[in-house]
Image (cartoon, rainbow, N blue to C red):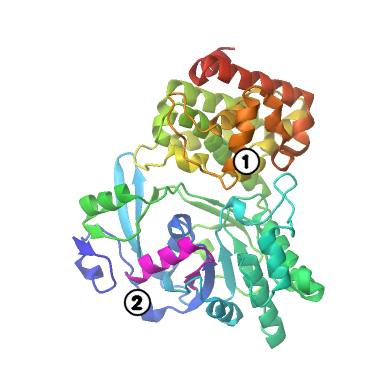
């Protein structure tokens, strides 16, 4: 067993890839908010590859965050010199590598140090991974909502912000005052037009206390849209033990992920960028087609298996894909309804992309879990499912499978699986969802009263009828029988 640290890198087994660059050769160029597993399996891996190619050593990452969990990650990574073990898993192979693209981590409670980094001319990109629900947007419209209490508070106390966007706005304010060129804000979250959403959030906070600053941000900072993709489960003791048993490494917070990785970015940077195109990042004029493809087929597909899997007590995603009902439902909703709403994507055959997604979901080595996919439905459904319903209704197409998925989400939020097991709360709005799900057991339309989730879709007679029918069937027949009957039609 080898404890992960820079001093111990020479002691690791020869089949474990390690950095060929020294920490002393790196200089900070990126401040990243939200150092979670996905960031370390994705953005940090691309930069590690770039540094290994002896390129762009002035673009190293400094991590930070605003949540208590960010402090936990800080402590875990600092104890091992900010190194991360990334294990890429396929059905018959596992490869481990140690990445060293991060050189520092500002703890979340040290706001002065975070703002100082934001104002540092060396920081030319601020990247963000704060999940779909972290952008303070109205789920039904996708617009930034300044009425969130945290945002309103930042507007009243701009020099002591508590949100990522309040901090970023303050950092840009300091740069403007000092005559320092602004940085690029690069969202790495699964949100349609994530760059535009980030711009609206940063400028929206600034506008609450300084409209001139908001205009300056909109005119001078850059907010590229991007599509990010790599299935990366949460780390548990299972992954720590696997790393120890299979590779002899003791790592506080290892990252397990699939081998597949993709990043499509608009080349819209105001203060330089690393040569990411040399390590596989695809730069395009418009990321919209790629966003539609990934968010609808992959993230929508995740939703389609999460809730039946949860209700049928399936824990792992690959087991859900192999379940005769869940796997068949996934195929039906994708082929008959979701894929029809995806516009042509340059160089991509959608049928082949669907097969790729199906194989990725079925990978038994990943260890991805149904609870992870079922997490935060009140923020994910308005982004991954409801827009598909809206487009299908406009086109006059069937929405029966989409309505059934929504009914499964409602039944999941009741909080009990079909066997009577408690379903763990996995949503910031869980209490509200659970109450509405209980009412919907006898009055299905109670669930559609959530205007912030369904918006105008909830007023569609076609969707209301299909949803009510589906939820009534699930309650009267049970999930398995209702799914079986639905699939046989």
User: In this rendering, which labeled residue sits more in front, label 1 or label 2?
Assistant: 1
Write the start and end of the magenta stretch as one range.
Answer: 60-79
Left or right of 294, for residue 143: right
Q: Find out whether residue 61 is within the magenta segment.
A: yes
Q: Residues within 10 Å of mark 2 (few under 14, many from 20)?
A: few
Q: Is residue 377 visible?
A: no
The answer to whether residue 464 of the structure is visible from this angle is yes
Q: Which residue is mark 2?
A: 22
Q: Quadrant of the C terminus?
A: top right
Q: Which residue is mark 1?
A: 432
Mark 2 residue element: loop
Q: Position of residue 472 (x, y in %)?
A: 62, 18
Would you say residue 34 sits in the magenta stretch?
no
Which residue shows up at 66% across the image and 84% down it?
A: 180
- Observer-nearest of 330 and 430: 430
Give the residue drawn at x 49%, y 57%.
280
């Amino acid at each position: 067993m080898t404890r992960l640290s820079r001093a111990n890198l020479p002691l690791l087994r020869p089949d474990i890839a390690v950095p060929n660059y020294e920490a002393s050769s790196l200089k900070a160029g990126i401040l990243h908010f939200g150092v979670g597993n996905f960031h370390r399996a994705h953005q940090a891996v691309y930069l590690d590859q770039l540094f290994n190619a002896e390129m762009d050593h002035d673009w190293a990452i400094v991590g930070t965050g605003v949540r208590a969990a960010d402090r936990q990650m800080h402590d875990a990574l600092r104890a091992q010199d900010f190194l991360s073990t990334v294990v890429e898993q396929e059905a018959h192979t596992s490869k481990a590598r140690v990445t060293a693209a991060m050189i520092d981590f500002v703890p979340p409670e040290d706001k002065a140090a975070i703002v100082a980094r934001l104002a540092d001319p060396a920081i030319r990109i601020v990247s963000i991974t704060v999940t779909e629900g972290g952008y303070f947007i109205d789920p039904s419209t996708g617009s930034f909502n300044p009425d969130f209490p945290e945002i309103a508070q930042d507007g009243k106390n701009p020099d002591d912000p508590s949100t990522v966007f309040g901090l970023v706005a303050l950092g840009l304010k300091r740069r403007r005052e000092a005559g320092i060129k602004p940085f690029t804000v690069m969202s790495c979250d699964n949100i349609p037009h994530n760059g535009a959403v980030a711009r609206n959030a940063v400028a929206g906070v600034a506008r609450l206390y300084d409209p001139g600053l908001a205009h300056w941000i909109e005119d001078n900072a850059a907010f590229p849209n991007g599509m990010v993709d790599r299935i990366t489960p949460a780390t548990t003791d299972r992954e720590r033990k696997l790393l120890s048993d299979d590779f002899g490494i003791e790592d506080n917070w290892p990252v397990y992920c699939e081998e597949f990785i993709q990043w499509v970015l608009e080349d819209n940077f105001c203060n330089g960028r690393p040569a990411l195109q040399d390590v596989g990042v695809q730069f395009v004029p418009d990321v919209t087609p790629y966003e539609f493809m990934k968010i609808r087929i992959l993230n929508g597909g995740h939703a389609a298996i999460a809730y039946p899997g949860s209700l049928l007590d399936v824990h792992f995603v690959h087991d859900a894909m192999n379940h005769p009902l869940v796997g068949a439902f996934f195929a039906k909703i994708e082929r008959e309804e979701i894929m029809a709403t995806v516009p042509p994507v340059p160089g991509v055959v959608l049928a082949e992309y669907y097969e790729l997604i199906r194989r990725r979901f079925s990978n038994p080595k990943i260890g991805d879990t149904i609870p992870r996919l079922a997490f935060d439905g009140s923020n994910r459904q308005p982004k991954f499912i409801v827009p598909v319903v809206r487009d299908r209704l406009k086109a006059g197409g069937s929405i029966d499978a989409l309505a059934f998925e929504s009914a499964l989400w409602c039944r999941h939020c009741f909080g009990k699986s079909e066997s009577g097991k408690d379903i763990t709360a996995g949503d910031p709005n869980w209490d509200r969802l659970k109450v509405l799900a209980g009412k919907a057991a006898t009055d299905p339309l109670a669930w559609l009263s959530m205007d912030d989730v369904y918006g105008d879709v909830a007023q569609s007679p076609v969707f209301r009828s299909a949803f009510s029918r589906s939820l009534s069937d699930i309650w009267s027949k049970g999930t398995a029988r209702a799914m079986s009957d639905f699939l046989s039609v």
